[in-house]
Amino acid sequence: MSGLRRVLIANRGEIAVRVIRACRELGIETVAVYSDPDRLAPHVRLADRAVLVGPAPASESYLDVGRLLEAARRTGADSVHPGYGFLAENASFAGLVEDAGLVWIGPPPNAIAAMGDKTEARERMRSAGVPVIPGSEGALDDPDAAREAADRIGYPVMLKAAAGGGGKGMRVVRAAGEFESAFRGARSEAGQAFGDERVYLERFLDAPRHIEIQVLADAHGRTVHVGERECSIQRRHQKLIEEAPSPVVDAELRERMGRVAVAAAEAVGYRSAGTVEFLFQDDEFFFLEMNTRIQVEHPVTELVWEVDLVQEQLRIAGGDPILWQAPDEAPRGHAVECRIGGEDPFAGFLPSAGRVVDLEVPSGPGVRWDGGIEPGFEVGLHYDPLLAKLLVHAPTREEAIDRMARALDELEVVGLATSAPFHRAVMREPDFRAGRLSIRYVEEHADLLREPPNADTLRAVAAAAALLEEERRQGAHPRTAAGTGSADGAAARSAWQRTFDPL
């Protein structure tokens, strides 16, 4: 039982729903915060209390530290869970939460700061014996010194922002003649994204896999790893599909990577749940970064290792030791997660907005839906496009992929474009099914993003279906009120959802 009594969740969407559910099972009260357009969001309805923190722009609501702390004070919250995104890895916010006498459900602010500064993190990891990709020592401000470092490391090299990640401030430089413009571009983008123009250099790996290790650390001196996740399918450094375990990690490699991840966490005095990320190529793995928060993809670990990572976070923050014990035979089966975003995969994953007119959620054995939307919810363009996560668990990887394909066929979101057609195509693609993956997977399988030849017709059909459904719900259309339009709408949206097969 956690020592926490009432948690304010400084986030929204599916992660807020996920934290609310974990709290409820532990008997902890929850306080949701919301912006004007999120008044009817599921996380607002599910929480015990909810507080309006501002208008739509995140800077005036979910990122307004003063309003968040005032909401905690007014509702008598004793702790703050930041979820992921927004302020989750903001050491300053974590410090202000603690200064206000509240429990921060996350790692100590100094650990966030240490791992948030990528150059400091590299040095700490190197000192702790964690393998790091060959690169510059510290941040580089002078272009001549940076070019000399690149010549010393050898091309291709990667320029990376020192103060943040997520693909911002990153440039691949394949030849010396490209360096100066790439250096200027990386610094400019880093400054805009993080308010810090510093960049550093690493050797660029052409086609590595992205494999991460889940860790838990409590205040009683115990730090453990909870296996690995394969996160190689990504676009512009944003993950799209994750699975556990990795198809290429055996028990010996898992234990070796796990020991290194534990050493990385202990090197910064870590506490809470966190993720140590590695690049893996040619049987070598190198430290990439540490995410000092719960991850979007944490459920695949929960499914195969029989652990509730959010509940462990809450227990650790409340002063309890880690409850989870590694099972004798693990991992148990295989899990796959698809991130369902409000994005159009046929248009470069451009964000899509609209009202969720109808939603059919998959179910059945081994299917899990972590969602932050429901029929009637208005999806805007103010926040991250992630709508939900669809997960499956099965005895083997092949069975898990087949189960995910079935679940995706059942999924219907009417009212806006989603990434689901891309996921359906991947589940049928031979290289994915064979486990031949790298972070270049999407780039190398551009045919998966090919728009079906009758896409315009299908969009028109889907739009008509959405209108019919909306009119039926409002009782404004006599035919749909009688049920005729509803059947037509179901047939139409099924045509749109299922007509995509590039293979």
Image (tube, grey):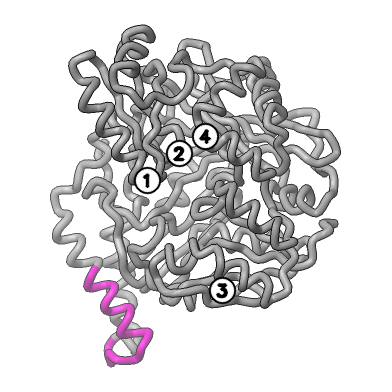
Name the residue that disc number 2 marks: 164
Identify the amino acid type marked 1.
Ala
For mark 1, give the secondary structure.
helix
**Element type at marker 4?**
loop
Q: Nearer the viewer, residue 136 or 77?
A: 136
Other residues around mark 4 within 10 Å, as few (<14) / some (14–19) / many (≥20): some
Q: CA distance from mark 4 to mark 3?
A: 34 Å
Point out residue 120 in the picture as x, y percentages from the top left corner: 55, 28
Range drawn in magenta: 463-479
Image position of 14 with respect to 394: above or below? below
Q: Earlier in the sequence, mark 1 or mark 3?
A: 3
Q: Quick check: 113 left or right of 251?
A: left
The residue under label 4 is: 117
Quadrant (top left/top right/bottom left/bottom right) for the C terminus: top left
Query: What's the distance in space between the residues labelled 2 and 1, CA to CA?
Result: 8 Å
Counting from the top left corner in percent of width and height, residue 485 is at 29, 80
Answer with mark 2 or mark 1, whichever residue precedes in sequence: 2
